[in-house]
Amino acid sequence: MSEASIRWISGPVLRARCRGTFQVHEALEVGEKRLRGEVIQVSKEELVAQVYEDTTGLRPGDPVQGTGRPLAVRLGPGLLGHIYDGLLRPLGSKDQQFVEPGGNLPDNDSLFEFAPAVTEGQELSAGAVLGTVMTSREQACLVPPDRSGIVESIRPKGKYSENETVCVLHSADGQRQNLRLSHDWAVRRPRPITQRLPVDQPMVTGQRILDMLFPVARGSRAALPGGFGTGKTILQEALAKWCDADVIVYVGCGERGNEMAEVLDEFPSLEDPRTGRALMERTVIIANTSNMPVSAREASIYTAITVAEYFRDQGLHVALMADSTSRWAEALREVSGRLGELPSESGYPAYLSSRLAEFYERAARVRTLAGRDGSVTIIGAISPPAGDFSEPVTLHTKRFVRSFWALDPERAHARFYPAIHPLQSYTEDADVLSAWWQRQGDPEWSTHRQRVLTLLQQQARLERMARIVGKDALPPAQQVVLICADLVNEGFLRQSAFSKTDRYCSPRRQSAMLRVIIRFIDLAELAMQEGASPEQIAALPILRALQRLGEEIAEEEIDRIRDLLRQLESEFADLKEIARAS
């Protein structure tokens, strides 16, 4: 192992004189406390490193020890259900949110039920399934992606700790390789796959405005930008609870300590609606608050995506919630400034765009080395200063995501949640997901989606006119458009995360709700053409029922929507008779 000594230090960045050979991204142990760090620049006689822990007390002359290995984390069956810091060291509980300086990942003494899936003499390729491990769910135990060989010995079915050898491989070069239930992997190195697969089905979130108007496919990427108080964290928590992913990885990257404390307090007590068990059983939380070392904030994003890829390689569908990538970009900016690099837009380093691309491109639906299909879907929150979507992090992120869910402060202040602005948001996954909705029994999904978006665009234009001339001065046809648009907003797009009835909406209920609302719009337009006034349409009792549709009709009562449809037809038939008589 190579050695160096500190020559200069500023915050998390140090320069050290080398006595040996170092390489970029090599993990380091710094000072007497053996603080964890990483090489970021190397010259012939000097290295530059960032330290992932508090550097208070370090001074010139303190030792720097190279490990000869890249910065890595340990991946194993014990990850699920726990809370970690940005370097995947366990925090233990919501009251223990810090790790002792220099602390490493402690040995996990828990025993896991292991069942082998291979026999002696069998040849195993990289990433192959070695066996299964039973935790809160069945997990696959994998051969590390950089190992392969012939099985020399395999332990029988039984209980083993993560660090016990369960298999010995004889590799092609004659080396014996001991395999455990866990293995280490470099966080900045994407885990290898066999091939990328095209996305073909949505990640169902249970939120109507997302699933119906701006869906995200499994293995795709979404951005969630919004200013302070617009509901980013609440929406991400709702997505984590209700989306149809097998595993949730939630990374709080540089968020305020009180917000992160709420997450740590609420998640362990949440119930998984799919199983009735604790939601934490399929969740990994990586907590890195704003008062933790800034360099660890930068590393936490890579730690989270590496954990997500590990579960993806088991053939699982993973949702990664990053809250927020703006704080991560600020960490890049601070370290870059201490390095004296030439700043780019708003002081961010010139490589901000490429770093964002590296992160988001690790989302994919793939064929794993074991021949299974898995996916990682990334939903990255952005906290633009003053809600300015033209700032660099938001602008660059838009280039690499396929769904953009813009949170609107005006909607949030009006207590309209989710506060997603339907005219500032977009998705590129809608076309490829149309076939999935047809298979679910909704062949008109694309038509209805476009109809709603067009109606909301008309509403925005007419409201600008109404502010000048007054709503009553608008022609009847335009007043009916505003009535219908208000129904779409109140009856379909508004959805409370705290409502027991409406916090989740299945695709079947979404289709049924939108179908009856579209029918109201059609009949309202026909009635207006036959002489009915906007006031008569707005006074129909069915309109009030449709505005409360999400709250009044639960998942198990979807058939009641047919009764509303019959009432709708009846009331408009009566209205037409009144219009003709007058």
Image: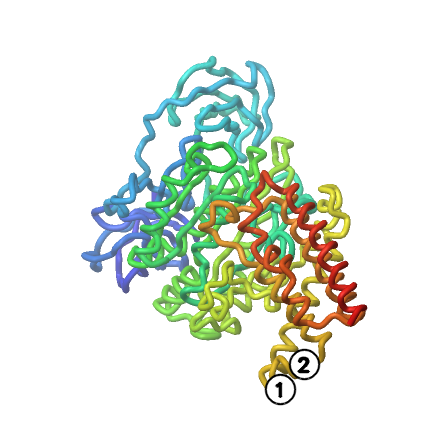
**From the viewer's perspective, is residue 287 above or below residue 415?**
above
Q: Under tag 2, what secondary structure? A: loop
Q: Is residue 326 left or right of residue 486?
A: left
Q: Residue at x 22, y 54 (%)?
A: 62
- The three-letter code of the residue at mark 2 reads Leu
Q: What crowding class fits label 1: few (fewer than 14 Cα within 10 Å), some (14-19), or many (20 or more)?
A: few
Residue at the extreme bottom:
468
Q: Amino acid at mark 1?
A: Val
Q: Quadrant of the C terminus?
A: bottom right
- Image position of 345 (left or right of 334): right
Residue at which label 2 appears? 474
Residue in the image at 72% along x and 45% along y: 436
Find residue 228 and report its horizontal and vertical position in percent. 41, 66
Residue drawn at x 37%, y 52% is 38
Residue at x 77%, y 48% (from the top left corner): 443
Colouring scheme applied when the structure was drawn: rainbow
Numbered badge on residue 399:
none
Depth check: 570 or 144 in front?
570
Label 1 sits on a secondary structure element that is helix
Q: Earlier in the sequence, mark 1 or mark 2?
A: 1
Q: How far across and how far down the image is residue 547, in percent? A: 58, 58
> Badge 2 local density, few (<14 within 10 Å), some, or many (20+)?
some
Screen quadrant of the N terminus: top left
Image coordinates for residue 181, horizontal then vertical, percent: 44, 27
Name the residue carrying label 1.
469
Q: Is residue 306 above or below residue 544?
A: above
Residue 310, relative to residue 17: is it above or below? Answer: above
Give the image quarter of residue 213: bottom right
State whether residue 245 appears in this view: yes
| Residue 355 visible from this viewpoint | no
| Mark 1–mark 2 CB contact (< 8 Å) | yes
